[in-house]
Image (spheres, rainbow, N blue to C red):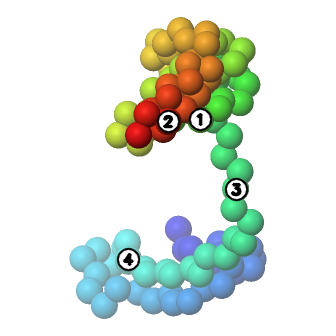
Amino acid sequence: MNLKKISEPLKYNIVKHELFPVICNPLNPTELTIIEKDIVTDEPQHVLACPKHKTQLQRIGDVFFSPEALTVYPILSGIPCLRVDNGIVASNYPEVYNLLTNCSQSCR
């Protein structure tokens, strides 16, 4: 496969294209092709969804809360655990979290 021939009609900016100086198999030469990536200025909007209801989750502290499922999904080492099996029933979690947060701030 020749990436240069594929990239040119797609209008990709080819920065460098050359054969490797050492070729082990002359029937299968190795090429180096560097293609410049387009700079995307708009950041993608990532939306995490409830695995059960497919609705948007709310981040509250160190968990994601699903108002429809009344369930929280933990975040472990920065990784959201978004499987139905990982959900913890927490029907009043936002209220309890706010109450505990306000209580701990006023007790200082």
Select label 4 or label 1 by which is in front.
Answer: 1
- Please rate how many residues cluster around mark 2, counting C-alpha atoms within 10 Å: few if below 14, some from 14 to 19, many from 20: few
Residue name at image x 65 percent, y 72 percent = 6
- Please rate how many residues cluster around mark 3, counting C-alpha atoms within 10 Å: few if below 14, some from 14 to 19, many from 20: few
At which x and y percent is residue 105? Answer: 48, 38
Select label 4 or label 2 by which is in front.
Answer: 2
- In the depicted structure, whether residue 27 falls above or below residue 76: below
**Residue 80 or 13: which is nearer the viewer?**
80
Can the viewer see residue 10? yes
Cα gap from disc 4 to disc 1, whole angstroms: 48 Å
Q: Quadrant of residue 31?
A: bottom left
- Of the residues shown, which amino acid type is indicated by label 1? Arg
Q: Earlier in the sequence, mark 3 or mark 4?
A: 4
**Residue 7 or 102: which is nearer the viewer?**
102
Q: Which residue is mark 3?
A: 44
Q: Which residue is mark 1?
A: 59
Q: Which residue is mark 2?
A: 106
Instruction: Determine whether label 3 and label 1 are within 8 Å by CB.
Output: no
Residue name at image x 67 percent, y 76 percent = 38
Instruction: Determine whether label 3 and label 4 are within 8 Å by CB.
Output: no
Q: Which residue is mark 4?
A: 30
Q: Earlier in the sequence, mark 3 or mark 2?
A: 3
At which x and y percent is residue 107? Answer: 43, 34
Residue name at image x 35 percent, y 86 percent = 20
- In the depicted structure, whether residue 9 falls above or below residue 61: below
In the figure, is residue 33 to the left or right of 53?
left
- Of the residues shown, which amino acid type is indicated by label 2? Ser
Cα gap from disc 4 to disc 2, whole angstroms: 66 Å
Cα gap from disc 3 to disc 2, whole angstroms: 38 Å
- Of the residues shown, which amino acid type is indicated by label 3? Pro
Q: Quadrant of residue 108?
A: top left
